[in-house]
Image (spheres, rainbow, N blue to C red):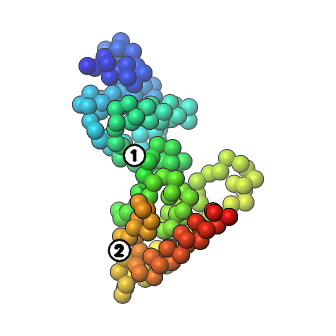
Amino acid sequence: KVDKVMGEVGLLKEFATRFPHEFSGGQRQRIGIARSLVMNPEFIIADEPISALDVSIRAQVLNLLNVLKDEKDLTYLFIAHDLSVVKFISDRIAVIYKGHIVELAESEELFANPLHPYTKSLLSAVPIPDPEIEKNKKLMVYDPAIHDYSTNKPVWTEIKDGHFVWGNSPEIEMYRKELENNISEGAK
């Protein structure tokens, strides 16, 4: 079973007799993935699985994770700070601020229609490959003081099918209007 799983993650079965210090970072990550696959899981928690890897190795590991997700019908809880990576690997994204989920939507929906101010600030920080656009883009800074929850408490609300956001009544109304405007502008 070990040989089979080693092969599935792109490692030779001869590697099973090597010592940890004999592996590169990418190989170690593949071994970690293989270890999790031995138990035939349905759900894997991947906490910053590529953060310490070179860019080229990151792409290989991400592609491997995507292939395994499809082949083995896996579900990942993929925890990362690099939002371009999160978009690539995720079907749905939950944005967490200080331990609370503030927005949840399908990947494409979240990137196209971010509603919560914290989500917007995170997405504004994603690097853009075009230097001219990157140079002129406006970064948004999240200020939690904009929320007044002293009298009107926030609730978890489904704004659109599968798109949830945390906010109080006035914020939810504002998010609904913003989403309607985004949709009508996109239709033009």
Task: Pick the residue in front: 37 or 109.
Answer: 109
- Kind of residue at disc 1: Phe
Q: Is residue 32 visible?
A: no
- Kind of residue at disc 2: Val
Q: Which residue is mark 2?
A: 155
Placement of the C terminus among the 4 image quadrants: bottom right
Q: Are marks 1 and 2 in contact (CB under 8 Å)?
A: no
| Res 101 quadrant in image | bottom left
The residue that appears at 73% across and 50% down in the rendered structure is 131
Q: Is residue 99 left or right of residue 89?
A: left
Task: Pick the residue in front: 92 or 24.
Answer: 92
**Residue 11: % across, % down:** 40, 19
**Residue 169: % across, % down:** 41, 81
> Given the current orientation, which residue lies at the most extreme left position?
39
Q: Is residue 162 above or below residue 49?
A: below
| Res 28 quadrant in image | top left
Looking at the image, tell me whether mark 1 or mark 2 is earlier in sequence order.
1
Q: Is residue 19 left or right of residue 113?
A: left
Callout 1: SS: strand
Q: Which residue is mark 1?
A: 78
**Residue 71: % across, % down:** 38, 30
